[in-house]
Image: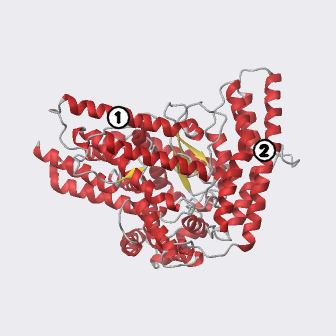
């Protein structure tokens, strides 16, 4: 889900006290267990694991939204503090914690699991140190994500109401919206003064989303009910309280909406309109103060590698060419008479209406039903691929109408650790032409099973692992696994329809093209239109899909490069293991090695796999 960078929740993951680096020559996780470790080593490991939990709880205590995300009802009526002053204070605490760990604990006395935790805590801390000077280069608001759209999404999807007190906490949060969004607005106004703002074309979308949120009752007399009031009514109506109490709660909620929510969004809309007048149409990070250095830091953060923009761009071009060759084979298999680009146009325009469900409620329900069936089928075959499987449930859900015009194609939301909320695969069904059925399989595998739900749910269900690792995240690892998860069903005999297999390749091609267009926009100064045209010329995706994607990459520099780089590393490590182990290679064990430690940087993932190979060979 979407949170401010100042909360302790990042896009799809809660990070505890961030950071990176390396201490000496530590043993990789997966090395032979320290069965002979003495009592001192065990005690040191126990001490640091307790310390990690203290740091995690200290960080969560500073974020009411993180507490809610974790299924807790402490500070349930509050929002996070979004001021820059609070961000600075948090940073100083994180740096103090990093220094404390280094000073207090003897790395060499830790067991292998605690050593890995030490390294990951350190890695995240050093990463935080690098990122902090750039904290106000990340757009506070954009058309793709931001607090303006995350407020109702949070209330709807995170704030459970199972008691009178929960409903009162919901009302308290409604009353706090004006302060919370006002803090974000202060940051955005300061950014604008310093030359940091999204392109002009993004503002109408932010304005539309904000107006959608305050449309309907009680905000106007259109006869419709606003999204927030509809959610509140639904939750309150399910309570076992009297009608008088329910009516009183609704009255209080409406008052909060009119006197906090509405003025907060009206103020945002006014700011967006004012900024739009002088905002430029320049798209890339290069336009920002020290933009080149900012983008280089973003690439390092997203990929957990030292690859340059030029290297990433060239890798993308090579991968696009390779995938085009595989698509040629499918084009010939289905008997299409024409070039690959003509085949792209055929798949995009779908003149025979073979690959698109109707743009109606019935068509959307059919899509959700079939996507659920794909996931259910894969769930029944997980024993073929995995030793460890998640306990958390997974559902498929449509992106809420108030945010679907600006939201991405699909995304995943973790389950609550206490089981109170399932994992959710969100499909954006605003325009069914942008969700062709030939891509349905690959998308369901990526966002659901065996993709993000497997990786993220397993991570937070790990035992004897510090909480900061359960809820942490490295984009290249997480999204690399998601893309790798689109590939492995092919080996199981799925994608039986050649068009569906073409869809798998189309999804991989999309991620390869991201390497090209992201670096093109932010390093080579491509315009929005140039980047959109590249996707239309080199992929079969529809124009609306290409436009929305490029607009996303523009306001999230570097993030789109993580997917392909992460997938290629996982495939590289798998081939290495297959070559080294031969008949002793077990795909289930390999996947366990990749998943059993939670998210890690790619270099540490490589160490883990190499240690597993060595252990298998020696035994």
Say which quarter of the image contains residue 152. top right
| Coordinates of residue 503 in the picture (x, y in percent) | 46, 61
Location of residue 162 with respect to 367 vertically, above or below: above
Q: Which residue is mark 2?
A: 260
Q: Quadrant of the C terminus?
A: top left
Residue 437 falls left or right of residue 30: right
Proximity of marks 2 and 1: CB atoms separated by less than 8 Å: no
Q: Residue at x 39, y 46 (%)?
A: 98
Q: Is residue 495 visible?
A: no
Give the Cα separation between the discs numbered 2 and 1: 43 Å
Query: Please, what secondary structure does the residue beneath circle 1 have?
Result: helix
Q: Which residue is mark 1?
A: 49
Residue 8 falls left or right of residue 363: left
Instruction: Report the colour scheme.
Output: secondary structure
Q: Residue at x 16, y 52 (%)?
A: 582
Say which quarter of the image contains residue 185. bottom right
Q: Nearer the viewer, residue 209 or 601?
A: 601
Q: Residue at x 76, y 52 (%)?
A: 265
Q: Which mark is residue 412?
A: none
Dot 2, how many residues are within 10 Å of its Cα: few (below 14), some (14-19), or many (20+)? some
| Coordinates of residue 575 in the picture (x, y in percent) | 24, 58
| Coordinates of residue 2 in the picture (x, y in percent) | 58, 50
Q: Nearer the viewer, residue 409 or 145?
A: 145
Furthest residue to the right?
Answer: 221
């Amino acid at each position: 889900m979407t949170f401010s960078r100042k909360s302790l929740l990042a896009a799809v993951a809660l990070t505890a006290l961030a950071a990176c680096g390396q201490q000496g020559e530590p043993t990789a996780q997966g090395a032979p267990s320290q069965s002979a470790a003495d009592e001192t080593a065990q005690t040191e490991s126990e001490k640091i694991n307790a310390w990690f939990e203290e740091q995690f709880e200290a960080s969560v205590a500073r974020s009411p939204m993180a507490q809610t995300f974790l299924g807790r009802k402490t500070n349930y009526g509050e929002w996070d503090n979004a001021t820059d002053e609070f961000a600075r204070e948090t940073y100083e605490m994180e740096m103090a914690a990093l220094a404390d760990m280094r000073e207090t604990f003897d790395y060499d006395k830790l067991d292998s699991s605690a050593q890995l935790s030490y390294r990951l805590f350190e890695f995240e801390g050093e990463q935080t140190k690098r990122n902090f000077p750039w904290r106000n280069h990340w757009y506070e608001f954009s058309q793709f994500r931001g607090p303006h759209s995350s407020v109702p999404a949070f209330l709807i999807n995170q704030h459970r109401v199972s008691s009178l007190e929960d409903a009162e906490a919901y009302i308290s949060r409604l009353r706090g919206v004006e302060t919370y969004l006002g803090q974000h607005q202060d940051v955005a106004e300061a950014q604008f003064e310093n030359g940091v703002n999204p392109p002009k074309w993004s503002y109408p979308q932010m304005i539309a989303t904000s107006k959608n949120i305050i449309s309907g009752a009680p905000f106007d007399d259109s006869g419709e009910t606003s999204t927030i009031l509809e959610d509140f009514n639904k939750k309150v109506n399910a309570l076992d309280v009297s009608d008088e109490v329910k009516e009183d709660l609704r009255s209080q909620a409406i008052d909060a909406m009119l006197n906090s929510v509405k003025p907060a969004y009206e103020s945002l809309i006014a700011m967006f309109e004012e900024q739009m007048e002088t905002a430029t149409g320049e798209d890339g990070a290069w336009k920002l103060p020290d933009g080149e250095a900012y983008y280089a830091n973003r690439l390092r953060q997203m990929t957990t590698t030292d690859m340059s923009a030029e290297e990433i761009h060239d890798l993308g071009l090579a991968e696009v060419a390779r995938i085009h060759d595989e698509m040629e084979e499918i084009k010939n298999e289905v008997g299409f008479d024409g070039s690959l680009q003509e085949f792209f146009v055929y798949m995009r325009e779908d003149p025979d209406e073979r690959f698109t469900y109707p743009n109606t409620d019935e068509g959307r329900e059919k899509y959700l039903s079939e996507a659920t069936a794909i996931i259910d089928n894969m769930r029944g075959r997980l024993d073929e691929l995995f030793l460890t499987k998640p306990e958390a449930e997974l559902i498929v859900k449509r992106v809420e109408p108030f945010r679907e015009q600006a939201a991405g194609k699909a995304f995943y939301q973790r389950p609550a650790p206490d089981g109170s909320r399932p994992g959710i695969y969100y499909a954006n069904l605003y325009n069914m032409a942008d969700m062709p059925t030939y891509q349905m399989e690959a998308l369901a595998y990526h966002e659901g099973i065996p993709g993000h739900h497997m990786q993220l749910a397993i991570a937070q269900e790990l035992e004897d692992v510090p909480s900061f690792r359960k809820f942490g995240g490295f984009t290249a690892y997480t999204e690399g696994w998601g893309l790798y998860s689109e590939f492995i069903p092919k080996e199981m005999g799925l994608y039986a329809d050649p068009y569906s297999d073409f869809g798998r390749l189309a999804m991989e091609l999309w991620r390869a093209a991201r390497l090209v267009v992201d670096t093109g926009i932010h390093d080579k100064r491509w315009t929005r239109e140039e980047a959109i045209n590249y996707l239309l010329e080199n992929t079969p995706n529809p124009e609306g899909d290409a436009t929305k994607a490029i607009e996303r990459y523009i306001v999230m520099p570097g993030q789109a490069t993580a997917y392909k780089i992460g997938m290629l590393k996982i495939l590289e490590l798998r081939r290495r293991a297959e070559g080294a182990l031969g008949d002793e290679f077990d795909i289930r064990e390999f996947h366990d090695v990749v998943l059993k430690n939670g998210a890690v940087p790619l270099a540490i993932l490589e160490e883990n796999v190499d240690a597993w190979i060595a252990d298998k060979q020696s035994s």
